[in-house]
Amino acid sequence: MSPTSSAPVPDQPATPPRTTPGNQAPGRPAPDSTRRSERSRRAIYDAALALVGEVGYPRTTIEAIASRAGVGKQTIYRWWTSKGEVLLEAFLDLSQRAAEELGEEWVFPDTGDLAADLKLVLRATVDEMLDPRFEAPARALAAQGVVDEQLGRTFVTQLLEPQLQLYVERLKSAQEQGQVRRDVDPRIALELFVSPLAQRWLQRSGPLTHEYTDTLVDYALGGLSPR
Amino acid sequence: MSPTSSAPVPDQPATPPRTTPGNQAPGRPAPDSTRRSERSRRAIYDAALALVGEVGYPRTTIEAIASRAGVGKQTIYRWWTSKGEVLLEAFLDLSQRAAEELGEEWVFPDTGDLAADLKLVLRATVDEMLDPRFEAPARALAAQGVVDEQLGRTFVTQLLEPQLQLYVERLKSAQEQGQVRRDVDPRIALELFVSPLAQRWLQRSGPLTHEYTDTLVDYALGGLSPR
Amino acid sequence: MSPTSSAPVPDQPATPPRTTPGNQAPGRPAPDSTRRSERSRRAIYDAALALVGEVGYPRTTIEAIASRAGVGKQTIYRWWTSKGEVLLEAFLDLSQRAAEELGEEWVFPDTGDLAADLKLVLRATVDEMLDPRFEAPARALAAQGVVDEQLGRTFVTQLLEPQLQLYVERLKSAQEQGQVRRDVDPRIALELFVSPLAQRWLQRSGPLTHEYTDTLVDYALGGLSPR
Amino acid sequence: MSPTSSAPVPDQPATPPRTTPGNQAPGRPAPDSTRRSERSRRAIYDAALALVGEVGYPRTTIEAIASRAGVGKQTIYRWWTSKGEVLLEAFLDLSQRAAEELGEEWVFPDTGDLAADLKLVLRATVDEMLDPRFEAPARALAAQGVVDEQLGRTFVTQLLEPQLQLYVERLKSAQEQGQVRRDVDPRIALELFVSPLAQRWLQRSGPLTHEYTDTLVDYALGGLSPR
DNA sequence: AGTTAATCGAGACGGTACGTCGAGTCTTCGA
DNA sequence: TCGAAGACTCGACGTACCGTCTCGATTAACT
């Protein structure tokens, strides 16, 4: 019940398995994706997520993933170009499955009370951030994205931005209802409460509590409301 | 002229070189820090920063640092426990030297106009974030801190928090002048404009411009000012 | 034309490459010897022998062997457990190839004149001991075998004993012809002329000449002949 | 009661500690031997012999010797040039002390019965070869001497040859008594029984027993006696 | 007896090689 | 033809010692 990872992502509706490796090496014949083993793909995702959870990202190796997945190394190198890419896809897949489990009905709540709606969603986000099932891989991916520009952009585009877009919609709705000033850019406004939360999570620069997010909403909305 | 790395850090005034390795291995006798070679320490810092700038953090190896510094590998392993630790100290050292170059006179501006002061400082911060001299190592450290908890805490404690504290002081001053509501927690309030900037930088989730930070200040202060 | 290293060794006819590492480490899965690279094996032998000849045994390193052979270090460690083992196999291989070159026809001469036959063979052995092609690796192996019991036993069993056996046969033949007393143990008797030669070579405790070996044979046979 | 190591060596009568390093480095000022610490010298000998006995020659390191002797590494490098040299001197010292313990009265037995005398001495030599107190360092030195020419020559000159000389004397005495032919070279003749024993010990190429050495003497003397 | 200079214990230093791990490539074999 | 298996080359890891080089603190020979 939060947009961080379980939202149905409209732009990415039930993405089918990629049909070509992320960065097709030029000299190599493209593998034939129609013959790809679905079973191996799943096993690799599971192994990757499990290992990152158990030993952390840096100590998760391709060899270990292959071995635990009961798969040859070549099968990994055939379809992905890097460890980060494997984990990113595995995580996207995990998010999608989580969303599907939740059903397709989730939408950003719009009770008419913007503050209440935001607090609700942010509280759920906090809960999810502390869920160990998501924490290890998400943190690993975020870290990798900081340093690996290509991976970072994919992470943002595929995962982060679609979810932020839901906040944009909700803020636009609030603008129409006169709860937020018309001259406010919702894409920037949402950062006032989302980014502090994100930074505390990423950098451990402060405690993550429901009170904290409530406070953020209160402080931020004060500056966005009409006088 | 920005608190991101060149501020004089009062709690850490001209820190002398660490006298013991960060995580003393239990079985090994502690090296005698009074006999440590200052020359090697400096050369290692320089080599580490240069290499991270040139080839990036993951391709910077201990061997390459040692080789470029003209130092035996063991001299690195004697005093640090990991690549991240070396780079962290090198970066802290760099920050301190930068601060000392600037002279001790830098203080957070307090013209009486809070918005103007904040905008000034945040613009400088943006400039610094885009300075390649700092970008590579800072980004590498931040990424490493996301994944390596101990490193992350040191990074936050030694570097980030002292600088955020300067914002806290400025906001308290504004509270005394009646420009900010008394019931606002300055430590949280500052995140309204600092964290969005940090997130955009870390995750490349949006452009970093002066207009952007100005907007952040405008939006945020609106909610903090007395009605 | 001497039994020291070029004799066809009947007990060891054209030994194929070992199929398992000498001392299989217990925790590691045994490598599959059917997929072993013959090319690498040969290159390693050549590099090892060449290096020992050039810089001596103690300064011959596994890294240097790997590098000169154009082979990864792991490929050496996969199939051998020590430098000595590599060199031993290389030397055994060299001996076998030398024997094969010579053709299979070499037999211990038996002209009926025992003294003459022994002098002939021992003179050839002296020549071989002074041949730099064999000297360096043979000396290195012998030294290593003195200190490393397992290696020493292999050296003796695989190389030394088969050749001594040829002397045993010749002495038995002499016994049948009545040139040597029947109550003499040939395995001990042969040491009277072989061991002094070996010791002078190993310990440099005296010059190695044809006159010397002739003298040895004369002295020794005196005690073995019937009265 | 054997010439192998406990004989008083006339050419080397109670050698005082060397006064200069074996191979004085040309550029370095010669250390002043009058101020040398006798205590350190002794401790180094003891540590070296103990370590070779415990872990073998190759795993005996200079650092370990220094550490166990409670001595700085430089103290070793000041007076010796290599591990082999240290051990050689330590072993020579050990031999001398053993000889002194035995008293100065030991001489090669000369009862008039050459065969009996030789058998007696060779049996004692066998016993000594199997004494673990001597075995490890002696074997280590012999091995090192095979490969390191300089060390080998010192070993032979200082230790081996003086003892062989005792056999020479005994054989000359036998020649005068008419028990050995006059035209026999005693230096070569002694190798007939000494070298086989030495080789079996060095190369483990056969069992070392009293019967064996008795047999050697019988076989060899047969060829040396007058007809 | 006090001075002084060399040796001493200690150990940090620049190096080299170790033996191991994992990356990414390539080959073999079975399904 | 793809996948499991794993041998291959390569590069970096973190460790062990090498032989050199300071450092005080003895310590033994000379004032």
Image (cartoon, coloured by chain):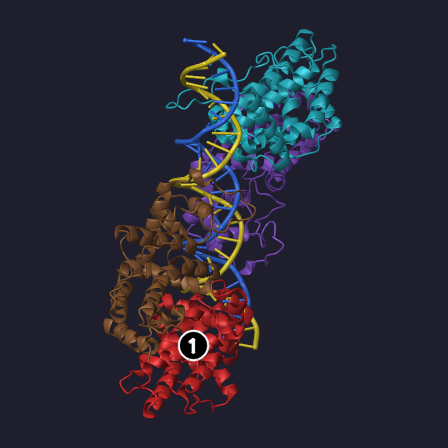
Chain colours: A red, B brown, C purple, D cyan, E yellow, F blue
Q: Nearer the viewer, residue D216 or D129?
A: D129
Task: Determine whether D69 is above or below A152 in the image.
Answer: above
Name the quarter where the C terminus of chain C is drawn. Answer: top right
Q: Position of residue B170 (x, y in %)?
A: 32, 65
What kind of element bears circle 1?
Answer: helix
Residue A27: % across, % down: 33, 70
Q: Is residue D19 visible?
A: no
* Residue C26: quarter of image: bottom right
Residue furthest to the front = B177
Residue in the foreground of this view, choosing between A204 and C192: A204
Above or below, B58 against B119 in this view is above
Q: Position of residue D105 (x, y in %)?
A: 69, 10
Asked if residue E27 is positioned above or below residue C160 in the image, the reply reads below
Horizontal placement of C189 versus C49: left or right?
A: right
* Kind of residue indicated by mark 1: Thr
Residue at image location 74% in from the left, 10% down from the top: D111
Nearest the eye: D124 or A168? A168
Task: Identify residue for label 1.
Answer: A215
**Where's residue C21, x and y in %?**
58, 52
Within 10 Å of the Cα at label 1, are there few (<14), some (14-19), or many (20+) other Cα atoms? some
